[in-house]
Image (cartoon, rainbow, N blue to C red):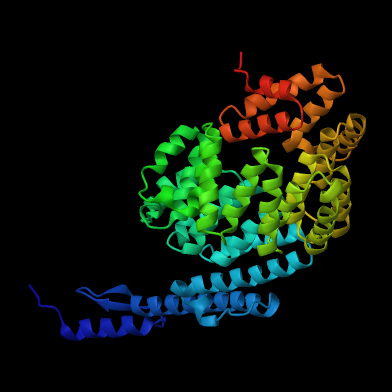
Amino acid sequence: MTPPDPTAASAATTKAAATAPRPRWWGRLVTDGNPPRPRLVVRWGRIATVVFSLGLFAYLGLATALWSYYVVQRKIPGVNWIDVVILPRFSRVQRAIGDYYFAQAKDEWTKKDFVRAIFTGRAAVVKAPANLDARLFLAGCWLEVGRPDEAVRTVHDGLAFNATDPRLQVALVRVCLDTSHFKELLEALRTDFPAHGVQLLDGRDRGYQLAEIRAVLETARAAEADQLVNQYPGLASDPTAAPLLAEIEWQLGRHDAAFARLGQARSRAPSNPTVQDAYADIAMRLGQADEARRAAAGFLQKNPRLLPAQLRFLEAFGSRKGEDERPWTAECFQFLAQHQHDASACGRLASLAASKGWTDVTYLLYQNSLQENLSGFPFVIYYAASLVKAGQLSEADRVWRELSVRNGQEIVSATYIAAMVDWGTGRESDALPIVDQLRRDSAGDRHRRRVIEGLFRDYGYPKLADLLSKPAA
C-alpha cells in the first residue's frame, strides 16, 4: 500500500483555502480532517455581544422616549431618567405620576370640576396606591358627591398598603360610622385589621372599642351591645363612653338611668362636646324642654362655632315662638353665614329642618345649594320632606312629581318620601308597593330598617312604620 503524499495533501489544503469564501463577523469556514472537508464555525460570542448591544440600545431608546413623554410632553415633575431605566426603581416613577395626578385632582376640586377631580383622584390612587393622602382625598370627594359606598371601599382598599398607619385606621372607622356601614366596620375591626397584624380592639384606645359597640348596637340588639360593654374593663366608668352607653340604656327602656349617666358624665367632663350634646338630646327626648334649652345654650356658649352645638341649639329652641324666636333666628343666620359653602353642614341643617317641618329653612338651603353648586344629597328632597312634615301634602306632591320628571335617579335613595306623599294624599295603593320594596331592600340591614321606621313615625305615618316592620308573607 502506497503511503499518502504529504506534499499533495498540503497542496489540496492550500487550494481549498484559496477558494473558500471570505470569513464573516458571525462565522467562517474552516477545512480540516482527512480527507480535508470545509466546516462552518459560528462565532457565538460575537453574535451574543451584538444582540445584547442592540437590545440594550433599543431598551435605552424606549426608556428615553418614555422619560421624554413624561417630562417633556406631560410635564410631570419628579420623573428621573435613571428611575425609568432601572426597573426596580420604576415605582418611583409611579409615585411621581401619582403625586402629579393628586395635585391636579385637588386643583380641579377647588375649581368645582367634581367629576374630573374624582377621575383624576382615582388615577392618582391607581398609580400610587400607597399614597394615603391621595386615598383619603378621594374618599372625601366620594362623600361630598353622595357616594358613601365608594368612599368606604376606597379607604378599605388601603388596608393592603397602610394598615399600620393610624391615619388609615381612624379614617376607616370614621367613614364607616358616618355612612352607617356598621357591618363593614365590624368586619374591619374583627377580621381585616387583624389579618394585617393590627389588633385595634386589644389596645387602650377606647375609640375603637366604642366603635365596635356602636356597630353591634346598630346591627344587632341593645342587649348584645350591653354585654359587649362588660368585656372591656373600666369602659362603663369612662365619661367619653357615656353617650353611647346612655343610648344603649335608652333602647333597653331605662330612660332615667340614661339621663342620670349623662348628668354624671357632664359633671366629670364639662368640656367634652359629645357628652354635652348627648345630655341636651336626652333632655329633649324626656320632654324636659327647659333643661334642654339650658343645656343647649351652655353647650353653644362654650363652643360657639362648633357644628353639633349650633344644631343642638337650633333644635332645642325649635319652637321659634315667644322667647325662642329671637335667639333661634340669630343663630340660624349665624349658621348660614358660616356654612353656606359647606355642603355637609348645610345638609345636616336641612335634615334637621325637614324633621321639624321648617319649610322656609329647607327652601332657603335648596336655593343656596343651586347658587353655590353644592354636591351631595339633593337639597330639594329635604324641601319635599319638610313639606310632608308640615302637612303641606299637595305642595309636596307637586315638588316630588317635578323632581321625578327632571331627575329620577336622585330620588332612588328617598322613596320613603314618595310613600308618605302617596299615603297622605289618599293614594294608598301607590304607597303600599313602595313600602313592600323598602321591606325587601332592608331585610338584611337592621339599621336601615330602623331608620326608615323612625322616619315614618317621626313624620306622622305610624301605619307605614307598622307595615314596614311587618314580617314578609
Which sits in the foreground, 56 or 237? 237
Q: Is residue 211 above or below residue 18?
A: above
Q: Residue at x 63, y 62 (%)?
A: 137
Q: Is residue 394 above or below residue 110?
A: above
Quarter location, residue 39: bottom left
Q: How many marks do you count on the picture? A: 0
Which sits in the foreground, 472 or 211? 211
Q: Is residue 410 left or right of residue 200?
A: right
Q: Residue at x 49, y 32 (%)?
A: 221
Where residue 344 sits: x, y (%)? Answer: 72, 55
Where residue 279 sits: x, y (%)? Answer: 60, 48
Q: Is residue 317 left or right of residue 254?
A: right
Quarter location, residue 65: bottom right
Where residue 102 sits: x, y (%)? Answer: 64, 68
Q: Is residue 373 visible?
A: no
Position of the N terminus by quadrant = bottom left
Q: Is residue 323 left or right of residue 449?
A: right
Which sits in the foreground, 390 or 179? 390
| Residue at the top extreme, as displayed | 473
Where residue 156 sits: x, y (%)? Answer: 52, 52
Position of the C terminus by quadrant = top right
Q: Is residue 235 left or right of residue 136?
A: left
| Residue at the left extreme, as displayed | 1
Q: Is residue 185 above or below residue 91?
A: above
Which sits in the foreground, 434 or 263? 263
Q: Residue at x 37, y 56 (%)?
A: 203
